[in-house]
Image (tube, rainbow, N blue to C red):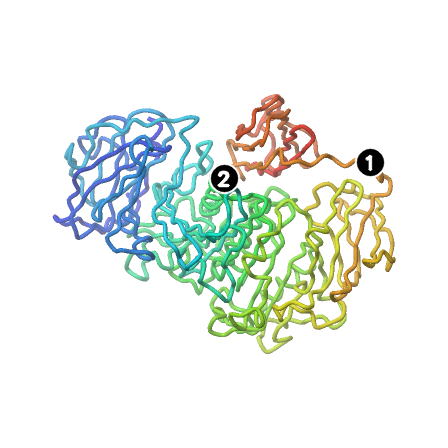
């Protein structure tokens, strides 16, 4: 009876729909493949607004025999998003054949519901238009069970729907996946997270992956593009959005669809437009159907269902051998920029760079009105993320630049572009944006902050950093191909406190008429990626201000800039708190410009104040040396481990720690608290090459449940060590 865990709270809402005689459903079928049961049925037009799906472990002969396991809008039980973006209007879903061998193509008037399996055994289904209760076995109720399997080798998969060339020289593929919706967001399969609440169980989502025909096989860099509030995945393909330069060069471009289909009372209709989730998620109790509130009530817990989906798809692409997890970046515009910010803060270990265009940093506001899925800021609705003190982080803080969703973990390299002529609701240029810029510049995260004359959509009102489609009149720093060489596990110099330097650019006080019309804090700073040295005893980089670029706005107009410097994402160079470290700044000829000593703070962080960086070609070498460790052999590096992930993360009951070995090796997997003390040894053994997965239930070696907070999963394979932060919720 495991699969009867979903009881959709439709009875709490007013039933406003009645089926017509023409909407009768027939020819119901169900079969198992790839970790899910695929339920299809035929119907006669006009299509019902919603269908209700019933499920049971025994044959269904009447409505009361079973529980409701799903309810779908027409846009969902047929491929509405695909029909809308790619056509034709009669396209049907493509699903795996029974047993997963091959694909079946469904017809124009064939509906689909997908149930994720949590136990092996027979499953029976019935489908009725909402408001109807007539069950006819063999017509709208299955008489032959779908025999579900469960366990190793039965992982959930994504499924190809379309292949096409968006522009000459590129190829695109559209995939779909169907969410597992459960009352407990942590009650997940080992291979598949809970990506929806019960009311959205079986919700379909799609994504688009594109690449140049000239790239070879094997894992490649990937850049994700998150569309705006009224956008679509198809806008995220090569040849589109030329002002942002989203054509990939070395790897893949992936565009997701964020269409949270729901009833919006102000419309009096179903909407997939404005029905987005802000790339985050929605409330545990949210019911999207007619007669139910469209916004979360005060006190609702907002679960990051959408983030979980994006992260799982990323892991799936890695598992397919397409994506290189070391070279992963994300970009987004408007609501997509808010999603980029929140995702980069929630899962910082996944991304090398995060680039935001026109994020107001405040999340949905009262101007969203009927679109507001989350409730309002004054409601104080919380997320499942915890701050450093173990308190739940408010939902609206997820979208700013300064509230960490994964405390203690360095952020990716963040770049934010905003426009002083942006007057679009919660994304507008205002005092909150400039306050966020000033606070972000003070944190030492190394963010590059830009502003110019653009409006919300720069194509119609471009600014200094995006004045046109050619390199001569826009920045290179926002291009997809510029992000591709950056590595997730590579340290970088974090330049900050630019605003304090004499003659620094000034964004003003939020009034577009104050401050400089365009400027940047950190955007002129560059470093040679190949020059980074990150060893136990020393860290070094070659840095400069950009000049000579054919992307003219990127060239620094000044000879030098003064700022502070700290190190982010150090892999081996990790001074102890209170340790004194020598530093020096050298010319490329080896001449000394400056030297000194700096003491690591309580977090082991070094801050080098008032550093002068010069315009190219005057590049300088900045070096830190732990004098007491000079001559100690650094740890060996190798490609033995090519992934280490935990899912779900954060978690309450259990998380699955997953990793892959390129070759056999002696492996030890342990869990440590933030003080470095080991709380649990999960593995100590010689492992074969390939993917491995172990569960941690939040208990120590004595079987005692440990306190909520941040922990480190530490994987040692031979001499190589990888660490992944995991967050245990109450």
Vertical arrangement, residue 76 with respect to residue 230, above or below: above
Residue 633 found in image quarter: top right
Label 1 vs label 2, nearer the camera: 2
Vertical arrangement, residue 101 with respect to residue 24, above or below: above
- Residue 230 in the image: x percent, y percent? 40, 61
> Which residue does the image show at 25% across and 30% down from the upper left?
124
Q: Is residue 430 visible in this depiction of the protein? A: no
Residue 475 found in image quarter: bottom right
> Which residue does the image show at 17% across and 38% down from the upper left?
27
Q: Is residue 596 left or right of residue 416?
A: right
Q: In the rendered view of the protein, which quadrant contains the C terminus?
A: top right
Is label 1 in a helix, a strand or a loop? Answer: loop
Q: Please state which of residues 103 and 692 is positioned toward the viewer in this rendering.
A: 103
The residue under label 2 is 321
The residue under label 1 is 632
> Disc 1 to disc 2, how far (Cα)?
37 Å
Asked if the residue under mark 2 is in contact with the one under mark 1, i.e. CB atoms within 8 Å, the reply is no
Vertical arrangement, residue 711 with respect to residue 611, above or below: above
- Residue 68 in the image: x percent, y percent? 28, 37
Q: Is residue 477 left or right of residue 301?
A: right
Q: Callout 2 environment at 10 Å: few (<14), some (14 to 19), or many (20+)?
A: few
Q: Earlier in the sequence, mark 1 or mark 2?
A: 2
Residue 602 found in image quarter: top right
């Amino acid at each position: 009876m495991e699969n009867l865990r979903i009881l959709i709270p439709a009875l709490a809402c007013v039933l406003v729909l009645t089926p017509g005689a023409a909407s009768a459903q027939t020819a119901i079928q169900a079969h198992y493949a790839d970790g899910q049961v695929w339920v299809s049925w035929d119907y006669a037009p006009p299509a019902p607004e919603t269908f209700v799906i019933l499920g049971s472990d025994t044959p269904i002969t009447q409505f009361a025999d079973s529980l409701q396991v799903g309810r779908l809008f027409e846009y969902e039980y047929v491929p509405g998003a695909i029909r809308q973006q790619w056509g034709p209007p009669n396209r049907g879903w493509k699903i795996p054949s029974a047993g997963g061998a091959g694909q079946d193509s469904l017809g124009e008037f064939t509906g689909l519901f997908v149930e994720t399996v949590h136990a092996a055994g027979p499953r029976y289904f019935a489908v009725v238009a909402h408001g109807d209760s007539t069950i006819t076995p063999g017509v709208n109720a299955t008489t032959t069970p779908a025999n579900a399997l469960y366990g190793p080798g039965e992982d959930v998969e994504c499924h190809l729907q379309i292949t096409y060339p968006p522009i000459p020289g590129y190829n695109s593929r559209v995939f779909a996946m169907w969410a597992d919706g459960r009352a407990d967001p942590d009650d997940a399969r080992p291979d598949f997270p809970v990506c929806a609440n019960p009311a959205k169980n079986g919700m379909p989502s799609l994504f688009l992956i594109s690449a140049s025909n000239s790239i070879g096989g094997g894992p490649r860099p990937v850049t994700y593009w998150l569309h705006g509030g009224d956008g679509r995945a198809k806008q995220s393909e090569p040849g589109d959005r030329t002002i942002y330069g989203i054509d990939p060069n070395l790897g893949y471009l992936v565009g997701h669809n964020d269409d949270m289909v729901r009833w919006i009372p102000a419309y009096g209709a179903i909407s997939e437009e404005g029905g987005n989730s802000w790339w985050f998620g929605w409330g545990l109790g949210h019911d999207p159907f007619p007669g139910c509130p469209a916004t979360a009530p005060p006190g609702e817990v907002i679960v990051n269902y959408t983030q979980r989906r994006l992260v799982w798809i990323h892991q799936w692409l890695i598992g397919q051998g397409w994506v290189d997890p070391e070279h992963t970046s994300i970009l987004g515009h408007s609501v997509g920029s808010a999603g980029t910010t929140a995702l980069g803060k929630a899962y910082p270990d996944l991304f090398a760079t995060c680039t935001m265009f026109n994020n107001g940093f405040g999340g949905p506001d009262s101007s969203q009105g009927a679109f507001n899925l989350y409730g309002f800021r004054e409601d104080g609705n919380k997320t499942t993320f915890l701050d450093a003190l173990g308190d739940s982080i408010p939902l609206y803080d997820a979208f700013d630049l300064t509230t960490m969703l994964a405390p203690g973990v360095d952020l990716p390299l963040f770049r934010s572009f905003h426009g002083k002529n942006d007057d679009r609701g919660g994304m507008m240029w205002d005092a909150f944006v400039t306050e966020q810029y000033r606070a972000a510049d003070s944190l030492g995260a190394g963010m590059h902050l830009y502003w110019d004359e653009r409006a919300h959509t720069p194509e119609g009102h471009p600014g200094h950093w995006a004045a046109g489609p050619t390199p001569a009149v826009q920045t290179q720093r926002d291009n997809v191909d510029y992000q591709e060489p950056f590595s997730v596990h590579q340290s970088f110099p974090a330049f900050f406190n630019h605003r304090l330097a004499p003659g620094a650019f000034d964004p003003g006080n939020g009034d577009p008429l104050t401050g400089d019309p365009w400027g940047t804090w950190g955007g002129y700073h560059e470093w040679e990626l190949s020059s980074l040295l990150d060893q136990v005893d020393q860290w070094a980089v070659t840095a400069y201000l950009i000049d000579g670029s054919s992307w003219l706005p990127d060239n620094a107009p000044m000879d030098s800039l003064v700022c502070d410097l700290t190190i982010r994402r150090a892999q081996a160079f990790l001074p102890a708190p209170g340790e004194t470290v020598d530093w020096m700044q050298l010319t490329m000829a080896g001449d000394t410009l400056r030297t000194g000593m700096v003491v690591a703070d309580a977090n082991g962080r070094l801050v080098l104040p008032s550093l002068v960086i010069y315009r190219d070609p005057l590049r300088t070498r900045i070096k830190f040396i732990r004098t007491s460790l000079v001559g100690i052999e650094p740890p060996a590096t190798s490609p033995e481990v090519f992934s280490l992930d935990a899912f779900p993360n954060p978690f309450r009951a259990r998380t699955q720690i997953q990793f892959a070995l390129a070759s056999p090796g002696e492996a030890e997997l342990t869990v440590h608290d933030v003080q470095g003390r080991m709380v649990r040894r999960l593995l100590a053994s010689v492992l074969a090459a390939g993917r491995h997965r172990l569960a941690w239930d939040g208990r120590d070696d004595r079987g005692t449940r440990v306190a909520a907070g941040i922990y480190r999963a530490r994987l040692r394979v031979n001499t190589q060590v990888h660490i992944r932060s995991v967050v245990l919720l109450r």
